[in-house]
DNA sequence: GTATGTGAATTTCTTCACAGCA
DNA sequence: TGCTGTGAAGAAATTCACATAC
């Protein structure tokens, strides 16, 4: 058995090309499940139990974890405290991350007051908007700057994560501004296909698209 | 070549078991792209052009469409007006759909004022909450009722789609209430794994999970 | 006995490559 | 010629099934 931590840390960008995309997207579900079990004061759980709770096949869970190391004990299962720590480490969640928000409209305001982010260590440190009316009045504790100030302000913050909550036609501009300011990972809520250069991660959360998919299943399925 | 419309309509639940899940999730992206091209007054486009704009492989697009019929003209491409209509029909978007919202907190309020839904024919007709303080005061035009009234009120509305924007620990209850009221498709924003009986479609939009996935790519990738 | 980790088998999805049509 | 629609090939992901460890 290889030393777990060194295996984990040796998995730099390079070796990670081998981890299936779907695996990465499931890690978060496992972590959520483990947190839930820990809240119930459980000390260990088998892959079968986590499978039951997440709806993900037990062999799938074991294989997913196997890309990152060996975390279980045959005959016993997984120590939940350790597994939570290891999953968090794998996902880069062992330190707080500052986040920039672009768009101080309805959605932007809702996102800034969403406590789920802060609870998981994502702290929105500043918002930016094109609308001069919105600039200057903080949302809660979060200052609102003009989009033009993005790069200058982020020289100070050094945030690597951005949220884009602007209308579709402004989304590419917002993303470009974030990337220019040094942001490396972006969650985009605008219903638009955005291009970014290699090395930048962008994920789209398109609510209308989700509704359309529901509609499909309503019509068929 | 089979008659397109009858093929489309013959694809009831049954034959649809053959359509890959990822195909269904891409349909919405195609539709969005086609709408964009139409906004630019374009009359036709090739699969290659749609591929370039969406980032989805051209053969993939053609195969995806092929599950539903033949929509293109060899040598020419796709008639965009027709394709938009057909995609909308496939996805069940040719009529308006009433939507119920559970949770009148920050996120719920943002969702109700999100114009993107209405623009695509999803109309939030009522909101429900457990908090007596929130009941009675409309959000914009949308009345807010107590969750207990859900079934009774939906006897009138007959909505088949629900949005769940409540804390995790209330999500299963909210979903159960929606299902009991006749809702068949649900978009859940709570970070929780929710069980529903067969025949009910539920999709999760877990923002924290999305952030964690970004964090993974920040650490590696 | 119980449950992990993992090669092998299977299933699913994507891409190729080309026949056939406009 | 240009582009679609689609079988066949290839790649990727999932699931099985079992040797191995506690």
Image: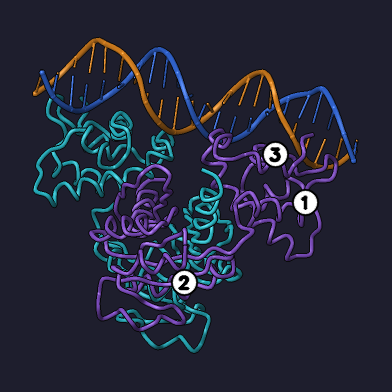
Chain colours: A cyan, B purple, C blue, D orange
Residue B54 in picture, x, y percent from top left: 63, 51
Residue B203 in picture, x, y percent from top left: 42, 51
Residue A220 in picture, x, y percent from top left: 55, 45
Q: Looking at the picture, do discs 2 and 1 lie on one chain?
A: yes
Q: Which residue is mark 3?
A: B7
Residue situated in front as seen by the camera: B96 or A213? B96
- Is residue B186 positioned above or below D11 on the image? below
Labels 2, 1: front one: 2
Quick one: quadrant of the N terminus of chain B? top right
First in sequence: mark 2 or mark 1?
1
At a point 29% along the width and 53% down the height, the residue shown is: B192
Q: Looking at the picture, do discs 3 and 2 lie on one chain?
A: yes
**Contact (Cβ within 8 Å) of mark 3 with mark 2:** no
**Contact (Cβ within 8 Å) of mark 2 with mark 1:** no
Q: Which residue is mark 1?
A: B45
In this rendering, would B51 be left or right of A54? right
């Amino acid at each position: 058995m290889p030393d777990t931590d060194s295996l984990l840390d040796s998995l730099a960008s390079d070796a990670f090309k081998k981890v299936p995309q779907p695996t990465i997207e499931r890690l978060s579900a496992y972590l959520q499940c483990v947190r839930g079990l820990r809240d119930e004061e459980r000390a260990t759980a088998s892959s079968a139990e986590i499978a039951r709770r997440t709806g993900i096949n037990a062999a799938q869970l074991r294989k997913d974890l196997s890309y990152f190391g060996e975390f279980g004990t045959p005959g016993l299962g997984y120590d939940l405290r350790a597994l939570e720590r290891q999953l968090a480490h794998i996902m880069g969640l062992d330190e707080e991350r500052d986040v920039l928000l672009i768009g101080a409209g309805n959605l932007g305001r809702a996102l800034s007051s969403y406590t789920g982010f802060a609870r998981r260590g994502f702290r929105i440190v500043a918002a930016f908007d094109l609308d001069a009316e919105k600039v200057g009045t903080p949302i809660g504790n979060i200052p609102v700057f003009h989009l033009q100030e993005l790069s200058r302000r982020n020289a100070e913050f050094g945030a690597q994560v951005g949220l884009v909550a602007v209308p579709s036609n402004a989304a590419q501009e917002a993303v470009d501004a974030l990337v220019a300011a040094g942001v490396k990972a972006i969650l985009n809520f605008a219903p638009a296909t955005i291009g970014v250069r290699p090395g930048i991660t962008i994920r789209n959360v398109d609510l209308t698209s989700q509704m359309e998919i529901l509609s499909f299943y309503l019509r068929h399925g």
